[in-house]
Image (tube, rainbow, N blue to C red):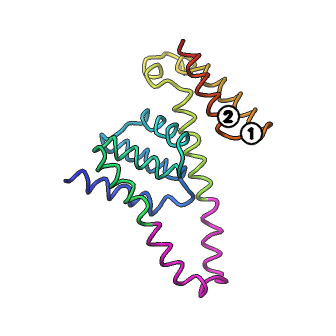
């Protein structure tokens, strides 16, 4: 029973403070991975990959995945419910008072400060995902040089797909499929 309360509390807190969408939940999930045995940093990278590849909001997908890893189906329901509950409550409150504060300088100032903060959280999340994707943790612990820890195939794939997606504005599913195919080829 305690684990369900912990899941609820951690994901409610994540849902309350992860302003800016699913990627903004990554620093919170990283913190959860460091404090609880539910999943580790390497599984976090897998969670991001699965959450990005499946339909639906990434934050909800990640909460569902993390909850399932922690305590099965009921854990996934608790984590997902806890993540969305703060947004639901806040939207109800905002909808009630929206007309009154629509032109408020204070509200506009809050959003002016939130935008760069959210951008910073997303940048940190991006860096952590990239680090987990191109640095092999096992090799990093036993390597004499940081260069030995890099997965150069993954780094080349990252740079290639980044440049192609920047230059050719194709659907993200195409780049996910290319990445999955490259992963299969790399493992052969």
Residue positioned 74% across, 39% down in the render: 170
Residue 169's place in the image compared with 79, above or below, is above
Q: Are marks 1 and 2 in contact (CB under 8 Å)?
A: yes
Q: Position of residue 3 (x, y in %)?
A: 24, 50
Quarter of the figure with the C terminus: top right
Q: Is residue 81 left or right of residue 90?
A: left
Tell me the CA gap for discs 1 and 2.
7 Å
Q: Position of residue 45 (x, y in %)?
A: 48, 36
Q: In which image quadrant can residue 110 be found?
A: bottom right
Label 2, residues with CA under 10 Å away: few <14, some 14-19, many ≥20 = few
Q: Which residues are magenta?
A: 87-116
Q: Is residue 178 left or right of residue 45?
A: right
What's the magenta bit mostly, secondary-structure-wise?
A: helix
Residue positioned 64% across, 38% down in the render: 173
The residue labelled by disc 1 is 170
The residue labelled by disc 2 is 174
Residue positioned 56% across, 27% down in the render: 134
In reply to whether residue 115 is colored magenta, the answer given is yes
Residue 156's place in the image compared with 12, above or below, is above
What SS does tag 1 mark?
loop
Residue 56 is tagged as: none
Residue positioned 69% across, 29% down in the render: 159
Residue 127's place in the image compared with 78, above or below, is above
Which residue of the protein is positioned furthest toward the left in this rendering?
Answer: 1
Residue nearest the viewer, comparing 94 with 56? 56
Residue nearest the viewer, comparing 177 with 27? 177
């Amino acid at each position: 029973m305690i684990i369900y309360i912990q899941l609820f509390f951690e994901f409610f807190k994540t849902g309350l403070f992860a302003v800016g969408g699913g990627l903004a939940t990554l620093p919170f999930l990283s913190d959860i991975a460091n404090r609880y045995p539910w999943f580790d940093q390497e599984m976090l990278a897998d969670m991001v990959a699965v959450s990005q590849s499946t339909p639906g909001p990434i934050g909800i997908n990640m909460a569902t995945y993390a909850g399932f890893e922690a305590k099965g189906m009921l854990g996934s329901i608790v984590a997902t419910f806890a993540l969305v509950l703060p947004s639901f409550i806040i939207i109800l409150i905002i909808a009630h008072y929206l007309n009154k504060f629509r032109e408020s300088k204070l509200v506009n100032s809050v959003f002016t400060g939130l935008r760069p903060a959210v951008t910073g959280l997303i940048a940190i999340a991006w860096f952590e995902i990239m680090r987990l994707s191109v640095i092999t943790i096992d090799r990093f612990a036993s390597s004499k040089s940081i260069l030995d820890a890099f997965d150069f195939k993954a780094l080349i794939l990252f740079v290639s797909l980044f440049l192609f997606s920047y230059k050719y504005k194709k659907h993200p599913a195409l780049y996910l499929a290319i990445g999955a195919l490259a992963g299969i080829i790399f493992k052969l």
